[in-house]
Amino acid sequence: MKFYSLTVSKIERFNADSLAISLTIPDALRSIFCFEPGQYITFSHSVEGEEIRRSYSIASTPSDEIITVGVKEVANGMFSSYANRALKEGDVLKVAAPEGGFVLDKQAGSILAIGAGSGITPLLSIIKVALSDNPDVKVGLIYGNQSARSMMFKNSIEELSENFGNRFFAIHAFSREQGGDYFGRIDRGVILHALKNSLAGIGVPDKAYLCGPEAMIHLAKDTLLDQGVAAEHILFELFVASEDAKEINVKGLASVSVLLDGENHEIQVPKEELLLDSLLEQGIDAPYSCQGGSCSSCICKVTEGSAEMVRNQVLTDHEIASGFVLSCQAKITSKAIAVDFDNV
Ligand code: FES
């Protein structure tokens, strides 16, 4: 995975534990850092000599001159704490090219976005581009936060309401204070009530975009399925994948053939280890970001042999049937395996 040095051009603080970081894209890197609304970038950062990688969704739009991400500080978050406490304008960060399949469908005539906390980040880019590129699209947003103060990108949302008041409808749910459209977390009741009232103009959305904690995504998805939204029209982006890992009892060594960046590598790896860990240990620079099964940076295709994932909230049944695995979650279940990181 290749990282490029980008300069922090602006830091905008939202509240005590969240901010937006804007990065300047030099002309020479414009083609590498072009992106689709909804994608994310990955930072590589060194903490006490150890490299950590973290991915953050892009809130800006492709027509902006910069890339902006939202970073909320999380407990023991090695990058998010650094970004919130130490990062300054003018600092240089190592950043990989944008990626991700959670992207705007420009043909959609109506869009429903549901997000909680920093889940607003990719939704904002999707909403901004949908509204400005398609004069007919209607967009509803249900945004959950603890309070008005804990919101990220509050001003941007208000600006969208001012500029696109007849086509953009924002609904706020606050779990720790009154004052929003709903009191409490986003749940089935909130979504159904909003769809029947303030968001009635959206009808059954052509596309739904969900971004937030896993529990919110599951309940929103189930609610929308019940409302007649087809599963393939509901896209979601997880913050952190579920902790429940499937037990896959495999032992011994497997022969692994890896195609990466046009080069073939032949190695032996212990089957009980996760494939990505083994590759990195053996000096193979496989792509990765979250290492937790939620981003899909590490996706590869099994072209011979077999592997099973201990955890998967990202790949569809169709993708799995086509041989794709998240290498950070995969254990090899055959004696020999060939994996392809290039044609994914
Ligand atoms: S590195 Fe994020 S899913 Fe594997």
Image: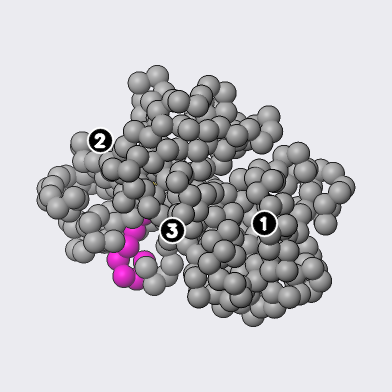
Mark 2 nearby-residue class (10 Å; few <14, some 14–19, many ≥20): few
Q: Amino acid at mark 3?
A: Glu
Regarding mark 2 in the picture, which secondary structure is present there? Answer: helix
Q: CA distance from mark 1 to mark 2?
A: 47 Å
- What is the magenta range? 320-327
The residue lying toward the viewer, choosing from 138 and 295, is 138
Which residue is painted at 18% across and 57% down in the image? 338
Query: Residue 169: x, y in percent?
Result: 72, 64
Mark 1 and mark 3 lie on one chain; the one further toward the N terminus is: 3
Residue 326 colored magenta? yes
Dot 2 and dot 3 residues touching (CB under 8 Å): no
Q: On the rendered image, what quadrant is the N terminus found in?
A: top left
Dot 1 and dot 3 residues touching (CB under 8 Å): no
Query: Residue 229: x, y in percent?
Result: 61, 77
Query: Residue 63: x, y in percent?
Result: 46, 54
Q: Which residue is labeled 1 in the image?
A: 160
- Could you say which disc has been placed on residue 36 in the image? 3
**Visible residue check, residue 312:** no
**Visible residue check, residue 27:** yes
Mark 1 and mark 2 lie on one chain; the one further toward the N terminus is: 1
Q: Amino acid at mark 2?
A: Glu
Q: Which residue is labeled 2 in the image?
A: 281
Q: Is residue 121 left or right of residue 339?
A: right
Q: Nearer the viewer, mark 1 or mark 2?
A: 1
Regarding mark 1 in the picture, which secondary structure is present there? Answer: helix
